[in-house]
Image (tube, rainbow, N blue to C red):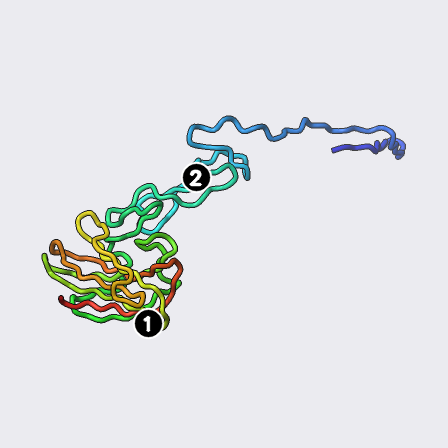
Amino acid sequence: AAMRYNWDPANGNGNNNIGLRLVRTAVLPVAQAACPTGYHVNTADKVCSPDTIACSLEFASAAIQTWNGAAYGDCTVVTCDAQSIQSGSVCTGACSATGAAATMTAAQTVTGALAATDSGNSVRGQGYYFDKYAITLTAGQKVRIALTATGSNWDTYLYVTGGTACGVLAQDDDSLGNYNSVYNFTAPAAGTYYLHATSYGGGTLGGYTLVTSAW
């Protein structure tokens, strides 16, 4: 601040040629000291921020985003939860009951549709919509599983997952003909298995019929 106008109360005169200037040394931002290991200087607020932060991915028990010098990148899987499997850089939830649309029997017909509101992280990878159905079978039980597209001639893809390793036990693309899928599955042990109705091509939407029967 500055005062350039001097007032003399004795004679009521003022003099704007003399005065007082108040001066303070400016405190400018200083460079951030070196951040601890695992941290970096955030360019936005100039404070130390962690190099990685936790993020959420479907069926992942741990996933992180990593600082790339300007921003945090995409989520990356660290580990998948106990009831899913890792396929490339994603967890596919092959054996997880989470997301099972319905419980089927060994002799049933259901109709459904792959929709943009479905999960887009199927056993086939990211970008593949899918519906999942739980089916309980006895050891050695045989079930024929048929997946047929309805409403449009899109290319179906069928998976059966389960077992102690939560892996893919069976899969089929076109064995039913006309881009439809079928598999004659024999349960290796008693337990719950999961039927995945999905598509050969990524991003496919459309109706389907899923039929289970004895063989």
* Element type where label 1 sits in the image: strand
Point out the image quarter for the C terminus.
bottom left
Q: Quadrant of residue 99?
A: bottom left
**Relative depth, front residue between 155 and 96:** 155
Alpha carbons under labels 2 and 1: distance apart: 43 Å
- Residue 100: image x %, image y %? 26, 60
Residue at figure coordinates x 52%, y 26% from the top left:
33
Residue 66, numbered circle: 2
- Residue 182 vertical placement versus 91 (above, below): below
In terms of sequence position, does the residue under pointer 2 or pointer 1 come before the other?
A: 2
- Residue 20 vertical placement versus 117 (above, below): above
Residue 189, numbered circle: none
Left or right, 133 with respect to 51, comes to left
**Relative depth, front residue between 46 and 102:** 102
Point out the image quarter for the N terminus.
top right
- Residue 160: image x %, image y %? 22, 57
| Amino acid type assigned to the residue bearing label 1 in the image | Thr
- Mark 1 lies on residue: 150
